[in-house]
Each structure stands twice: as C-alpha cells, then as structure tokens.
Amino acid sequence: MGTKLKQLSIALWQPILLAAYTAVMIFIFSLYKISALDWAVGIGALSSSAFIVITSPKKISAQNKNLILSYIIAILFALLVHIIKVNSNLILHSTNIHMNESWMVFIILFATLVMAKFSIYHPPAAGLSMVLAVDNFNMPTVFIICFGVLLLALINRLLHDYLKDLF
C-alpha cells in the first residue's frame, strides 16, 4: 500500500505544476484589457502547450526547440496576414466572414508547411496563429504569449530530469 501511495504522490506533482502554470498565465492575461477571444485562445494554446511539456516531456513536441520555434512561426504568420489585411483594399476587409475563413486556411497551410519543412512540431501554436490574424493582432497578447512560452521553456529546462511521461 505504501508503494502505491508514493507512486500516486510522485504522479500528482506534475498536474499540480500544470494547474499552477495555467493559474499564473490566467492572472497575467487578466491584467491587460484584451479581447475575450484573444484571452480564451491565448490561455487555451498555452495550457495545451503546458499539458504537452509537463505531462509528456519526452515527446518531440515537448522539446524547447519545437515549443519556441513553433510559436515564433505562428506569430510571424499572424503578423504577416495582419499586415496584408491592414494594407489591402476593401475587398479583403476583415468584416467579410468568408475572407476570415480564407485567412485561417492560408495560415494553417503555410504555418504547417514551414513547420514540416524545418521539422518543428508543436500543434497548439498553429491554432493560435489563426486567431491572432483574424482577430486584431494585439501586441499585449503577443507579449504575454511570448512570456508564457519562455516561462514554459524555463520550466521544461529546469525540471526536465524530474518530469515523467504520464501519457
């Protein structure tokens, strides 16, 4: 019975770390006035990334290289689409829902192609890029996401030897 309790306590600290990270990011997001969509998707993407890094640290998608570079690619594609939308004529204006859907397909296609070309694999970043581009590209949101990714990479670096694959 003692061994099972010890195994349970060892396995519990990783979900607690995941919850603590999510709580910190929710607090940081709540300090800034950003759209509900940016808030929800930012927290969702970072929590999904934290789930991968903290509960499956030996997976390829949990490597810091993949984590950081995938978010950089996602943010750059979102910025590119945002710049195109801002500088384009009224035909491409973002109020046209079909154009927003087209931008989403464009971002997923090209972000995935770039990630595949360079063997960078971290799925939560791709979804984030769609929302950043379709919703107004909000710099406070981008800075918070960058901070969250760097914090997660630091956690991964410091605790990598202690993290175990739970799934």
Image: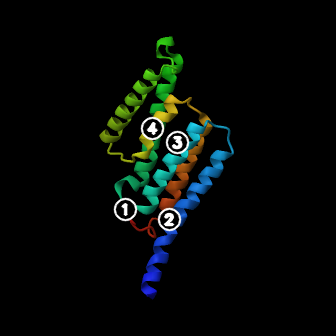
| Contact, mark 3 vs mark 4 (Cβ under 8 Å) | no
Residue 7 higher or lower than 120, as above or below? below
- Residue at 51% across, 34% down: 132
Q: Distance between the residues labelled 3 and 4?
A: 13 Å
Q: Is mark 1 on a helix, strand or loop?
A: loop
Q: Which of marks 4 and 1 is nearer the N terminus?
A: 1
The residue carrying mark 4 is 74
Q: How far apart are marks 1 and 2 (CA)?
A: 16 Å
The residue carrying mark 1 is 58
Residue 6 higher or lower than 115, as above or below? below
Image position, residue 134 (x, y; %): 50, 29
Q: Distance between the residues labelled 4 and 1?
A: 23 Å
Q: How many C-alpha atoms fall within 10 Å of the one at disc 4: few (<14), some, or many (≥20)? A: many
The residue carrying mark 3 is 41
Identify the amino acid type marked 2: Pro
The quadrant of the image that shows the N terminus is: bottom left
Q: What element carries label 4?
A: helix
Image position, residue 72 (x, y; %): 47, 40
Q: Is mark 3 on a helix, strand or loop?
A: helix
Residue 53 horizontal side relative to residue 143, left or right = left
| Contact, mark 4 vs mark 1 (Cβ under 8 Å) | no
The disc placed on residue 32 is none
Tally of numbered discs: 4
Q: Is mark 2 on a helix, strand or loop?
A: helix
Q: Earlier in the sequence, mark 2 or mark 3?
A: 2
The disc placed on residue 15 is 2
Identify the amino acid type marked 1: Lys
Q: Mark 1 or mark 2, which is nearer to you?
A: 2
Q: Nearer the viewer, residue 86 or 51?
A: 51
Occupied quadrant, residue 167: bottom left
Q: Mark 2 or mark 4, which is nearer to you?
A: 2
Q: How far apart are marks 3 and 1 (CA)?
A: 25 Å
